[in-house]
Image (cartoon, helix red, strand yellow):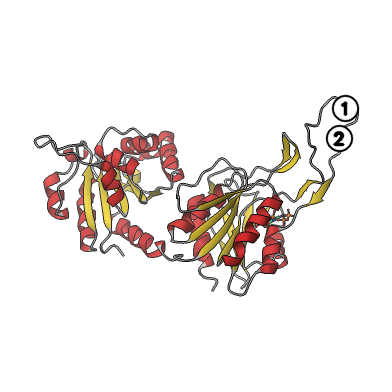
């Protein structure tokens, strides 16, 4: 899968830089065109001569070549690349990447990269375990970067623990797998709902819920990265899409969400109902703000909202796939199975509010997937970006 791919190999200043030579060789052997970008500290560990000989390209390290004044454009490099892999990534470079400290060519290239970025940290175990490193890695994950976790083992310091850069063969495997799955949704039209709905009470108040939209947005990003043509119908959230190819339709209420879904669903191959739709809405919306000085406490009469998933379930054609979510607090499996059948879904993704790290607002999730062909797949607690790909992988096994 790496043949002909343009890869930027970023090398930082750490002992593991010696492994970058093997990584470079393996990438070139696999047919990739590799441009090495090395930090000034990286050159203390490994020489540009070795790297340029193996990549057959001058190594880039400074913003310009001192004797000729030739400018190295990080913007052009960022556009050229199909992917960027930073191996080894030191604690300091990870911190700079997380916070946009653009003081060397590698970080400016990272900030300009339009392609997927893979980060293979390497450092001592205490640095790796430090809350600042963990926080910076979480930030990189939240930007959509892929972290290739270091292994546990003997470290350069003589200590034993987590911090050894992943072996070059494994890094190549990760990249290979990434490119293999990347286009597997190419040409598929997908509808994804995300976030809460807000049901107006009066001009300043609404009924809503805690949904952040993060899971739905992660699925939309993952699907678009895998080649799908994505329409994301989103309730009011603060998260934003980073892939400009995603068509975002913003709605507020359940009725608006239903209408946007009904417009898109007939042309779709796959629909994923990730939104936390309010089940009820006020029967009528007060035209002006309900005031506190009333003698009587107002009573808000609620009416049932349409069930968007169930409506699409009724309209579903044979070749369409409909996926729902279930957020449950008790009798989780029973309730999820019931929704799978009742809404005519092909698959349901169950999150339990009992699992720490799962549910609203957090960046991680722990899901169980139930399929209409009676499979039950349990997944561990993972970042929502990875859960998104697990969900898409399982959808591809449905037909
Ligand atoms: N859903 C929907 N429209 C609604 C309610 C739910 O499309 N009015 C979808 C959700 O997006 C989700 C699935 O149905 O994919 C299950 O949502 P959930 O809130 O767990 O179930 P409800 O049907 O609302 O049942 P309950 O609130 O009783 O658990």
Query: Measured from the top left, where is residue 134 in percent x and y?
Result: 43, 39
Instruction: Give the x, y percent position of residue 226.
Output: 44, 60
Q: Is residue 47 left or right of residue 393?
A: left
Q: In which quadrant is the N terminus drawn?
A: bottom left
The image position of residue 347, as x and y in percent, is: 61, 65
Mark 1 — residue? 294
What is the distance, in whole Å, between disc 2 and disc 1 at their CAs?
8 Å
Q: Is residue 299 above or below residue 116?
A: above
* Nearer the observer, 242 or 50: 242
Q: Which mark is residue 86?
A: none
Depth check, front residue: 364 or 320: 320
Q: Is residue 126 above or below residue 187?
A: above
Extreme residue toward the right, this view: 295
Q: Quadrant of residue 272?
A: bottom right
Which residue, as the protein is rendered here, is positioned at the far top? 293
Element marked by disc 2? loop
Residue located beneath label 2 in the image: 298
Q: Are marks 2 and 1 in contact (CB under 8 Å)?
A: yes
Picture mark count? 2
70 to the left or right of 222: left
């Amino acid at each position: 899968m790496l043949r002909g791919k343009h890869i930027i190999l970023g090398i930082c200043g750490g002992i593991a830089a010696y492994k970058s030579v093997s990584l470079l060789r393996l990438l070139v052997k696999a047919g990739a065109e590799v441009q090495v970008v090395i930090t000034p500290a990286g050159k203390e560990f490994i020489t540009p001569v070795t790297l340029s000989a193996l990549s057959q390209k001058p190594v880039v390290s400074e913003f310009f070549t001192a004797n000729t004044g030739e400018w190295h454009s990080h913007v052009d490099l960022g556009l050229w690349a199909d992917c960027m892999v930073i191996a080894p990534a030191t604690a300091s470079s990870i911190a700079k990447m997380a916070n946009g400290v653009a003081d060397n060519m590698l970080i400016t290239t990272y900030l300009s990269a339009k392609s997927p970025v893979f980060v293979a940290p390497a450092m001592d175990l205490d640095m790796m375990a430090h809350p600042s490193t963990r926080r910076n890695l979480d930030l990189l994950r939240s930007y959509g970067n892929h972290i290739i976790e270091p292994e546990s083992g003997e470290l350069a310091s003589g200590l034993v623990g987590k911090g050894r850069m992943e072996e070059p063969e494994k890094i190549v495997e990760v990249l290979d797998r990434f490119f293999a799955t990347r286009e597997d949704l190419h040409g598929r039209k997908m509808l994804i709902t995300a976030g809460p709905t807000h049901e107006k009470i009066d001009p300043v108040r609404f009924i809503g819920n805690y949904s952040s939209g993060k899971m739905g947005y992660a699925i939309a990003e993952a699907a678009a990265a895998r080649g799908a043509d994505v329409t994301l119908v989103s309730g009011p959230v603060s998260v934003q899409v980073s892939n400009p190819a995603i068509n975002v339709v913003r709605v507020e209420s359940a009725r608006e969400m239903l209408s946007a879904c009904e417009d898109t669903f007939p042309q779709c191959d796959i629909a994923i109902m990730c939104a936390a739709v309010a089940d009820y809405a006020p029967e009528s919306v007060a035209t002006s703000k309900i005031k506190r000085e009333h003698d009587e406490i107002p009573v808000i009469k609620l009416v049932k909202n349409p069930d968007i998933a169930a409506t699409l379930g009724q309209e579903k054609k044979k070749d369409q796939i409909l996926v729902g979510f279930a957020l449950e607090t008790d009798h989780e499996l029973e309730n999820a199975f019931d929704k799978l059948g009742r809404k005519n879904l092909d698959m349901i993704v169950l999150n339990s509010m009992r699992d720490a790290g799962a549910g609203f607002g957090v960046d991680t999730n722990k899901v169980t997937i139930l399929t209409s062909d009676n499979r039950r797949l349990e997944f561990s607690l993972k970042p929502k970006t990875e859960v998104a790909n697990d969900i898409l992988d399982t959808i591809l096994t449905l037909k």
